[in-house]
Amino acid sequence: MDYILATTHDKVKWYKFSIPPVKGGYELLNELDLTQVPHYGDKESAKVAARALGLATWRYVKIG
């Protein structure tokens, strides 16, 4: 199971960013292209990336 960062809105947008994540270094995608977004093996790793990007809110989405 992988985790991908997404917005918390009713119409979900996806955070695209480079590894390692840097504050403000992201763009929002209107559709999910799994080849464009980083995957994490657990919530804690995804949370570390979200904080490094400076995101105030996000949602964990299980992909598997």
Image (cartoon, grey):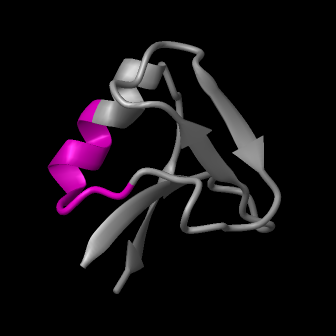
Look at 44% across and 15% down and name the residue there: 22
Q: Is residue 53 left or right of residue 36?
A: left
Looking at the image, which residue is at 73% across and 56% down?
13
Of the 4 image quadrants, the one containing the N terminus is bottom left
Residue found at x 38% / y 76%: 62
Q: Does 34 sit above or below residue 47?
A: below
* Relative vertical location of residue 61 with respect to residue 49 in this rendering, above or below: below
Is residue 36 found left or right of 52 in the rendered image?
right
Q: Main secondary structure of the magenta part?
A: helix
Instruction: Check the picture and name the quadrant holding the C terminus.
Output: bottom left
Task: Give x and y (percent) for residue 52.
Answer: 36, 20
Q: Residue furthest bottom?
A: 64
Residue 9 part of the magenta segment: no
Is residue 32 shown left or right of residue 30?
left
Residue 58 at what x, y percent from top left?
51, 47
Between 35 and 44, the one lying in front of the other is: 35
Number of labels in the image equals 0
Asked if the stretch drawn in magenta spans residue 45, the answer is yes
Q: Residue furthest top?
A: 23
Q: Is residue 2 above or below residue 29?
A: below
Indicate the quadrant where residue 48 lies.
top left
Residue 28, compared with residue 36, is above or below; it is above
Q: Position of residue 24 (x, y in %)?
A: 59, 15
Which segment did they paint magenta?
Answer: 39-48
Could you say which quadrant of the image residue 14 lies in? bottom right
Say which residue appears at 47% left-offset and 31% top-offset.
18
The image shows residue 33 at horizontal and vertical percentages of 65, 67
